Amino acid sequence: MRKAIIAGNWKMNKTPTEAAALVESLKPLVADASCDVVVCVPAVDIPAAKAAAQGSNIHIGAQNVHFAESGAYTGELSAAMLKEVGVEYVIIGHSERRQYFGETDATVNQRVLAAVKAGLKVILCVGEKKEEREAGYTDALVEYQTLIALTGLDKKQVQSIVIAYEPVWAIGTGLVATDEQANETIGVIRAALARKYGKAVANKVRIQYGGSMKPANAKGLMAQPEIDGGLIGGASLKAKDFAAIVNYDKD
Ligand code: 13P
């Protein structure tokens, strides 16, 4: 059985002071979680969030990482830098990075390799745009995005990757994929992993759903057999809402 993982992606929200306060208020609300709990915060918030999370079951993640070890890459952060400030997880290939910052499948792959090499746990985002779903390309596209991003990893490393299936049309729109749609496409990703790396590996990879996941729809999504967690944007900015999603399996 795969352990569920619920992660918040705060995107460009919260100052360090606000980050510490949000983590503090989350701590008691998620203390009894049966899933892994992660918050992926803006880079400058990492020390404050880390200090606030001390001694709790909340793990800290970053929202991106550069592929080089060091060098002339103004504005970027290396995996070693993130590791040293206590980051455990890193989101790579979020659709907002692909859309607004020119991220490609090739650079996503390079970032994944750098993160894994440094011992960071990767949350790899894949997902189709609305017009791609309408044209019938969803399955081919998520398979292609996933396999390119993982190129160069061995089976053991692939097993440790968390994948977030985030249909772009469902992000921040209030439009959520139906439970069945999300389950089906995550099944397509898992089948692609099975073909390439074998069934045993594919069955160990945790695959989240992301896109307008809220307390009201979390239970239904999480009840689907292929869905192993959530990557939560808007609803992760409110302690009560995020905690309600984390506690999806409690009454
Ligand atoms: P929303 O939950 O705000 O739709 O964002 C999803 C997301 O992009 C998480 O990475």
Image (cartoon, rainbow, N blue to C red):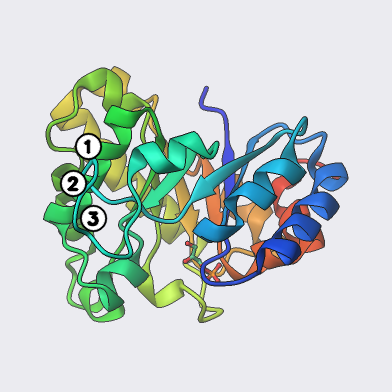
The answer as to whether callout 3 falls within 8 Å of ligand 1 is no
Q: Is residue 184 left or right of residue 156?
A: right
> Residue placed farthest to the front in the image?
72
Q: Residues within 10 Å of mark 1 (few under 14, many from 20)?
A: many
Location of mark 2 (residue)? 109
Three-letter code for the amino acid on which mark 1 is drawn: Leu
Looking at the image, tell me whether mark 3 or mark 2 is earlier in sequence order.
2
Three-letter code for the amino acid on which mark 3 is drawn: Val
Looking at the image, tell me whether mark 3 or mark 1 is earlier in sequence order.
1
Q: Nearer the viewer, residue 37 or 24?
A: 24
* Quadrant of the frame with the C terminus: top right
> In the rendered image of this protein, does residue 155 appear above or below residue 53?
above
Question: Percent x, y for residue 208?
Answer: 47, 47
Q: Residues within 10 Å of mark 2 (few under 14, many from 20)?
A: many
Distance between the Cα atoms at labels 1 and 2? 6 Å
Q: Is residue 60 left or right of residue 117?
A: right
> Can see residue 83?
yes
Location of mark 3 (residue)? 142
Q: Do labels 1 and 2 touch, CB within 8 Å? A: yes
Location of mark 1 (residue)? 113
**Secondary structure category for the residue under label 1:** helix
**For residue 234, which quarter of the picture?**
bottom right
Three-letter code for the amino acid on which mark 2 is drawn: Asn
Residue that appears at 52% across and 22% down:
1
